[in-house]
Image (spheres, grey):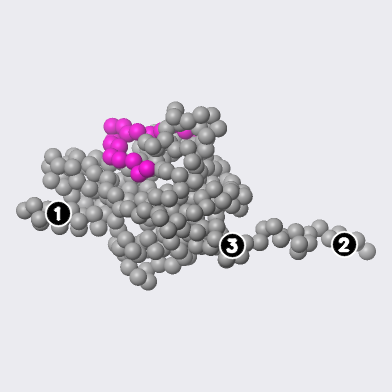
Amino acid sequence: MMETVESIILNGFNFQKMTSENLDKLFELNPNRREHIRPISVESSGAFGIGGYQYAVCEYIFVEDVLMNPYDVRDFLISSSYVCEQNGAPGMQQVIANDWVRPYLKYLYYLLHVKNIVKEGRMGMNHFAAYTNVFWKEMPCRDINYHRPHIDPGDYAFNLFLSDTFDEDDGTAVYSLTHNYEKWVDVMEMESGCGLRLEEIYKMMYPEEFGVRGMDKWKCFKGDKDYALEGIIPAQFNCISGYKGSLFHSPHYDISKYPDGHLRYSLVSMVAPGVLERTLSDVSKERIASQLDKVL
């Protein structure tokens, strides 16, 4: 008869218990947080603008000093999941279950509605996907991860930055892609405005020479003959940035500014595709149109 060995016991899970009350306390919002909608402006060249003027082509959400316990949240996330590397993205990622960050996702849900990005009843908690990004100076990545911007698979992305040593010029870079002398920062608007298929735009985004050279070390992309850097959505400790996933963007992480061993750690929460009823870009264009009416 085979001897039974008691290899696991119920008490062994005591240290891993997390109640809803504990989560609410962990992700407690700072009552003095500051919520903003900020524009990114470019020199107009025919797309949604007037020649020679600076005009807003997109806007982003920025929330300062959002959490009461950011260091505790960081420690909790680091210990809550294994990391995965070489999955196509630079550095490493941790997949985070929505239940672990539910109070925080409720706040993002509130932001999406109060800022008129989605209409009531258009989404729920299950429309979010959460993971962390772990970047460092010598991290491996594919050439398309640093030589060209990308677009996200989700409608909208939020970054909660949990490293406390960011350079003020780093964050998420937004680029314009030029086609027929017009600048475009949003792949969806480019598709409808230029009459191009997404497949044609992808070929412009990723020429054949990219994606075939395997893994290399991270380099900070700052623009080239096709892409112009239009602005940087800042990365600050205990702050949230939120933007459309269809913007041409990439991490702006200039490793020359940091010592060896530095980590860029953030919690990413992405809204599933096809969920947003309205977008910040629409809000931006409506505001610009109202401003032009006042001038004219």
Magenta stretch, residue numbers: 212-234
Q: Amino acid at mark 1?
A: Gln
> Label for residue 22?
3
Question: How many numbered marks does the figure carry?
Answer: 3
The vertical placement of 60 against 45, above or below, is: below
146 inside magenta stretch:
no
Figure quadrant of residue 250: top left
Earlier in the chain: of badge 2 and badge 1, it is: 2
Q: Residue furthest right?
A: 1
Closest to the observer: 62 or 44? 62
Asked whether disc 2 touches disc 3, contact meaning CB atoms under 8 Å apart, the reply is no
228 inside magenta stretch:
yes
Which-is-in-front pick, marks 2 and 1? 1
Figure quadrant of residue 19: bottom right
Number of residues whose C-alpha sits closer than 10 Å to that of mark 2, classed few (under 14), some (14–19) or many (20 or more): few
The vertical placement of 230 against 29, above or below, is: above
Earlier in the chain: of badge 3 and badge 1, it is: 3
In terms of secondary structure, where does tag 3 sit?
Answer: helix
Residue 177 x %, y %: 27, 41
Q: CA distance from mark 2 to mark 3?
A: 36 Å
Closest to the observer: 193 or 20? 20
User: Which residue position is annotated with label 2?
Assistant: 4
Residue 260 x %, y %: 53, 29
Earlier in the chain: of badge 2 and badge 3, it is: 2
In terms of secondary structure, where does tag 1 sit?
Answer: helix
Number of residues whose C-alpha sits closer than 10 Å to that of mark 3, classed few (under 14), some (14–19) or many (20 or more): few
Q: Amino acid at mark 3?
A: Asn
Figure quadrant of residue 284: bottom left
Q: Residue at x 27, y 48 (%)?
A: 39
Residue 162 x %, y %: 49, 46
User: Which residue position is annotated with label 1?
Assistant: 291
Q: Amino acid at mark 2?
A: Thr
